[in-house]
Image (cartoon, coloured by chain):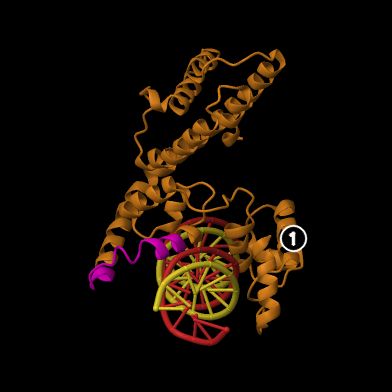
Chain colours: A orange, B red, C yellow
Amino acid sequence: MESSCRAAVMEGNMGWGVIEEEGWRKGPWTAEEDRLLIQYVRLHGEGRWNSVARLAGLKRNGKSCRLRWVNYLRPDLKKGQITPQEETIIQELHARWGNRWSTIARSLPGRTDNEIKNYWRTHFKKKTKAPSDAAEKAKIRSSKRQQFQRQQQQLKQMQIQQQHQQQQQQFQFNLDMKGIINMLEENDHRVPSISQETQEMASMYPNTSEQQSYFYSMFNANDNVSAPESSNEEILWDGLWNLDDILCNFNAASATTKAGLHNLVAPFC
DNA sequence: AATACCGCCAACCGCTGCTGT
DNA sequence: GACAGCAGCGGTTGGCGGTAT
């Protein structure tokens, strides 16, 4: 919103928003263009970006539309400054993966590769000014990485499938949790301490051991209760941030009330 | 008060890899 | 297997706004 206004202002002031030879508009997006793009994605979903111009009546090329959506309009984007936890994760992951911004972004839900890239450039690049042959070293690292990636790819695909199945189970579990919360609200009595409660909640699902262990890992991370083990490093890192997020919410909702419990479950929905 | 500098961010560009034919 | 089209990625650019001089 703010940016759209700013964009519109920029366009007005600077005469940007050029029409290319091919007829594509360039430069800052207007509020109207944003509206059309959002409408298009609602109707047709993400993807097929080259159809956007035709179907949505936008004079933007597919690339531009995709970028605008991914970096700014997506509803699941996290607004606001990078938190210290996120900063730590960015540093860790950059040390691990280098400039693979999209990979890093996948571990920071709601953050875009562009955002992380920009953040890194402005916050860390100066601090970590490398020797002159850094580019060469990076190339070598990159080729090694690609080799490694190919080897891992097949394994990864299998793991992704497994992960997807787990997510579906988790989604169902969250729906169940909502139901429980509704029940609690109906009963309208004070909720006991969160730790005790998590055990009670989990015990309500005696036949779904996976859900139970996941639940324990989320809410009892501070109590040294073992989380489900993952053999895959990336899944582990993906989970790391989610866990951080949950713990933040846990602290914020530390009042042992039903409202607090609401906040704990909300991030999954 | 003027201006130089810097951080931030949106957007573009070129390249690469994937997928369908 | 070759090719074309497309999506995605990383690098780069350029303007705005805040701060220092």
* Residue bearing mark 1: A35
Q: Chain letter of disc 1?
A: A
Is residue A53 placed above or below A176 in the rendered structure?
below
Please name the residue shown 52% across and 27% down the image.
A254
**Residue A24 in sight:** no
Q: Is residue A212 above or below residue A138?
A: above
Q: Which of B20 and A21 lies nearest the eye of the viewer? A: A21
Hey, what amino acid is under mark 1?
Arg
Q: Could you say where residue A174 lies in the image, as x and y percent from the top left?
A: 59, 28
Quarter of the picture containing the C terminus of chain A is: top right
Q: Position of residue A236 (x, y in %)?
A: 38, 38
Could you say which quadrant of the image residue A36 lies in? Answer: bottom right
- Residue at 46% x, 58% y is A116
Give the percent coordinates (x, y) of residue B8: 50, 63
- Which quadrant is the N terminus of chain A positioned in? bottom right
Is A31 left, or right, of A83 in this rendering? right
From the viewer's perspective, is A216 left or right of A132? Answer: right
Q: Is residue A129 part of the magenta span, yes or no?
A: yes
Image side of residue A171 versus residue B18, left or right? right
Measuring 65% from the left and 13% from the top, which residue is drawn there?
A189
Look at the image and give the residue range highlighted in magenta.
A117-136
The answer to whether residue A202 shows anywhere in this view is: yes
Q: Is residue A205 magenta-colored?
A: no
Q: How many marks?
A: 1
